[in-house]
Amino acid sequence: MRVVAREALEAAVAAWEGVVGREHVTREARDLELASTATYKTDSRHLAIVRPDSRQQVQACMRIANEHRVPVYPSSGGKNWGLGSRSAVQGEGVLLSLERMNQIVDFDEDLAVIRVQAGVTFGQVYRYLEARGSQLMLSVTGSSPEGSLIGNALERGHGFGPQADRFAHCHGPEIVLPMGDCIHGGLERFEGATAARFYKWGVGPHIDGLFAQSNLGIVTEMTFLLLPRPGDFQVVVASVASGARLGKFIDALRVVRMDDASDVQLVNRSRMVQSHQAGGVPPSRWPRSLTESGEDAWFMTCAVYAPTRAIGKARRKWIEGLIRPTADVFNVIDEPHRAWRRLARRVGLLKGQPPATSDPRRSHFMGVPAAEGLSFAYAAKPGWTKNVTDIDLDRDRVGIVWCAPVLPFAGTHMLAVARITRDVGADFGFPPDISLRPMNARTMDGVIGAVFDRDDPAADERALAWHDRLFQRLREGGYFPYRLNTRSMTALPPSREGFDHFLSDLKRQLDPNDILAPGRYDFRSALKLGSPSGREPDGS
């Protein structure tokens, strides 16, 4: 485990205070404890928190970190719950918090883009658009409204709506490199480029992807695409009660997902049962599709977007023609207000909230961020009450750990992943809690979770053992992750050909002192498992 020399830390802290101000460097024990806390047990810890408020201050902070050889871990919103929150990946380090960099830099209503700094949150953008009476919306997550757009995009996180693949719908990053230099991606690298805010690829090598899921630089600004608010919005729900019919159901759903005007989510029976139980809904009030289904049942929600009511009805009818013949249960929320209120009441009951009266334009499907969907996690806490509105999983020691496999869009693979999850869960006492997001018509991103009480050390250890076994079994089955938590950063095998060496050489060139987020998505530890060249990473 990497240990920071205390004299080096003292010198670096003094220098950082000179750059960002003494009030923006924290070494209070309680603050450091919370910054080092995740929704599962971690062995790393932060020694200080530094809060710059500009790209220039970030550059100065990185130069100081290199001078004194103190590792830093950047974080935007710190709401990476279930995947490591804002904790360091390994050993000791300093949290470089970008929360003060919270300016909306540019906005264009006509061309539907917004440019933000790293600390800007989903809730902030929503309020900004509402205050201007904008006809645009942002694809939001189902997690905290205080999560960072840039942080979520760089983790390749999910959103809701037609632009659910967030990293595919952002561009033009401003990047501080580990030694303190600054570069820009796309056409942003050219002064006066009129299309810089609107064109993703730029000219020449496209470098944006090097800074997603990596430790090669700190993204301080980025442009995001927005969506026009649809004139019509409907919801289709369906379920398949057994694996025997799943193949045809998924075949139909693939065709639906090829239409970018829809958004699809699939959950298995265990996830659906957990949601009902967490909401305090007794089995006598569960829908028949749930009570009469077997363990292989899957439940689908499909949001349908259209510019007009006529187009929406036609699109929904097309979807109905594809899915209804393959499903055991099929329903359409076709009356935009009255029917939605019925569903909203039902969902409100599941979440333990007062009955809702809003229409579909007030949901996350329509770009309205809300954290209430995470309240189910508090069911694992003794004395939990249903009215959870002030949600902070780290502060409240709520335990969640995620596995995130990507799998082909086929029923056989869904059942295989469910079987692996069920077998591993039975060994550790966790249900096979699975949610799948078809991000395109060919693959699905999975989110498989265990919920527990972090104040119970036995449950904490059991959840981590569950995660590690499940991660290994999924990998052995060919289901590699699309996203990693801090426990998984060194759990992948060596890559084919020269990928690991290429990445190691790039890291060595950009970060010779191994200062920026050591261990984060760099995979250099895989070289120690054996390679033809025998090279090993520096600074480890």
Image: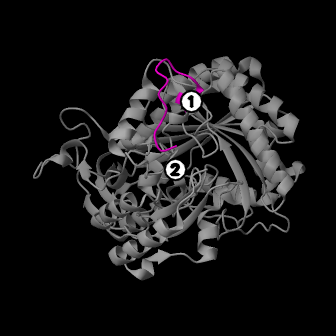
Q: Secondary structure at mark 1?
A: helix
Q: Which residue is mark 1?
A: 528
Instruction: Say which residue appears at 59% left-offset and 70% top-offset.
Output: 32
Does residue 386 sit above or below 317 in this rendering? below
Q: Position of residue 169 (x, y in %)?
A: 36, 43
Distance (Cα) linking label 2 and label 1: 45 Å
At x 72%, y 27%, the residue is 473
Determine which of the numbered discs, if any, sits on residue 202 in the image. none
Question: How many numbered circles are shown?
Answer: 2
- What's drawn in magenta, residue-wise? 526-540
Whether label 2 touches label 1, CB < 8 Å: no
Question: Does the segment drawn in magenta span residue 530?
Answer: yes
Which residue is tagged 2? 365
Q: Is 463 inside the magenta-drawn segment?
A: no
- Inspect the image, locate mark 1, and give the three-letter code of the amino acid beneath it: Lys
Please name the residue shown 52% across and 50% down the image.
365
| Amino acid type of the residue tagged 2 in the rendering | Phe
Q: Looking at the image, which is closer to me, 135 or 424? A: 424
Q: Relative to 146, does residue 161 appear above or below in the rendering?
A: above
Query: Is residue 263 found left or right of 116 in the rendered image?
Result: right
Q: Position of residue 62 (x, y in %)?
A: 36, 59
Residue 44 higher or lower than 493, as above or below: below
